[in-house]
Amino acid sequence: MRGSVTTRSFAKGRRSFRLGEAAVISGLRCATYVILLAAGCIFVDIVRKGAPVVLMAKPPFVHMEFLTQAPQTLHVFRDEAGVERRMGELDFREYRSRVGRDVASARSYPYAGGGILPCIVGTVLLTAGSIAMAMALGMLCAIYLSEYGGSGAFIRAVRLAILNLAGVPSIVFGLFGFALFVLFFGWDVSLLAGWCTLAAMVLPVIITACEESLRAVPKTFREGALALGATRWQAIWTNVLPHALPGMLTSSILGIARVAGETAPIMFTAAFVMRDNLPWQGLRHAGDFFFQGVMALPYHIYYLSSKVPANEYTRDARYGTVLVFLVLVLAMALGSILLRARIRRSHRW
């Protein structure tokens, strides 16, 4: 009798638990769909407003001047036939010299004409350099913490410091880079200062992800190599790193997503509002490549959004730049994903 009562009570409690569990799962599912819907709406809005700036209906289907020219002042005017025309600064000067007179009806809009080629090049250089630097340092730090550091009080304090650094706002890293690399080291606003600042900002995330990837490799891999006479470093290099590398590349994907979109650090250390030459043009010495500032897509978007008077032409330039920026970040992250998948297929365990 007592056993049957207990069984009925347990069954009743189990039904209540299942109802509560179903309600929680439904709530989580709805929250996920809401977040995806909001992100999708934002992305659709960017594509709807930015696609006409970047794409066109006839071959070559892309506005090449937008991807191959530098930002210019846009001039809008009516020609002799009364047709409204839009020209960048260079084309407008040529047009004035050809007609031999000033165009009194021309209206000028700064940074709304030309293209964004210097911004694309600067973003790729800043992202690739900082990720390469952060991955090299992060992997070395993770190897030491995971394989050699042990679990003493000092190592625990280091891990805690790394976790705390991961939550520091990017503006703080920007001020740190400006004080250390730009002023103290005397590098001025340059690629090298931007690389070091962005690498320092993303380094905590990369160290944590790399250490977790190393810890996920079974100890038997290390023990098997040591039993065959390998040194500790040989065991790590031949048996541990190849199997941990796919997880380490995951951190590079996270790093690309964060580094490419940062504005505050590069604003203090690496980015110019306007620069005529590409980074490899006009160099006196090869070393000058690392000590020059560049334009960057996030800073260009920030400047168009906050410093230039809003109008329909600067809005088009802004949304076109945002669309190109999203495609560029997606392409870099996709490259890391494909590399990770290739390495994972060759090192299964």
Image (cartoon, grey):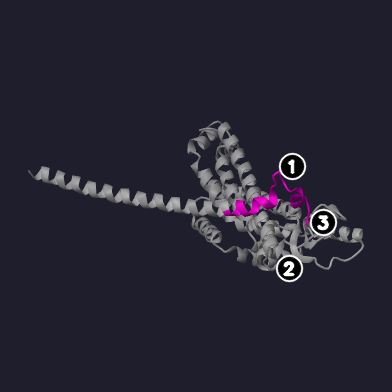
SS for callout 2: helix
Determine whether label 2 and label 3 are within 8 Å by CB: no
Q: Where is residue 291 in the image (x, y as percent from the top left)?
A: 78, 59
Disc ID at residue 60 = 1
Q: Nearer the viewer, residue 262 or 227?
A: 262
Q: Is residue 113 left or right of residue 260?
A: right
Q: Which of 116 and 50 is in front in this view?
A: 50
Q: Position of residue 246 (x, y in %)?
A: 57, 40
Quick one: label 1, few (<14), some, or many (20+) residues within 10 Å? few
Residue at image location 84% in from the left, 60% down from the top: 80
Q: What residue type is labelled 3?
A: Asn
Q: What residue type is labelled 1?
A: Pro
Q: Nearer the viewer, residue 144 or 273?
A: 273
Q: Which amino acid does label 2 sit on?
A: Leu
Quick one: label 3, few (<14), some, or many (20+) residues within 10 Å? few
Q: Residue furthest front?
A: 81
Residue at image location 72% in from the left, 46% down from the top: 62
On screen, 252 above or below 340?
below
> Which quadrant does the N terminus fall into?
top left
Among numbered discs 2 and 1, the one appearing first in the sequence: 1
Which residue position holds label 3?
277
Marks 2 and 1, how far apart in space?
46 Å
The picture quadrant where one finds residue 103 is bottom right
Residue at image location 60% in from the left, 38% down from the top: 338
On screen, 304 above or below 218?
below
Q: Is residue 125 visible?
A: yes
Q: Is residue 143 left or right of residue 288?
A: left
Among numbered discs 1 and 3, the one appearing first in the sequence: 1
Quick one: label 2, few (<14), some, or many (20+) residues within 10 Å? few
Q: Where is residue 216 in the image (x, y as percent from the top left)?
A: 49, 42
Q: Can residue 133 be seen in this view?
A: no
Disc ID at residue 183 = 2
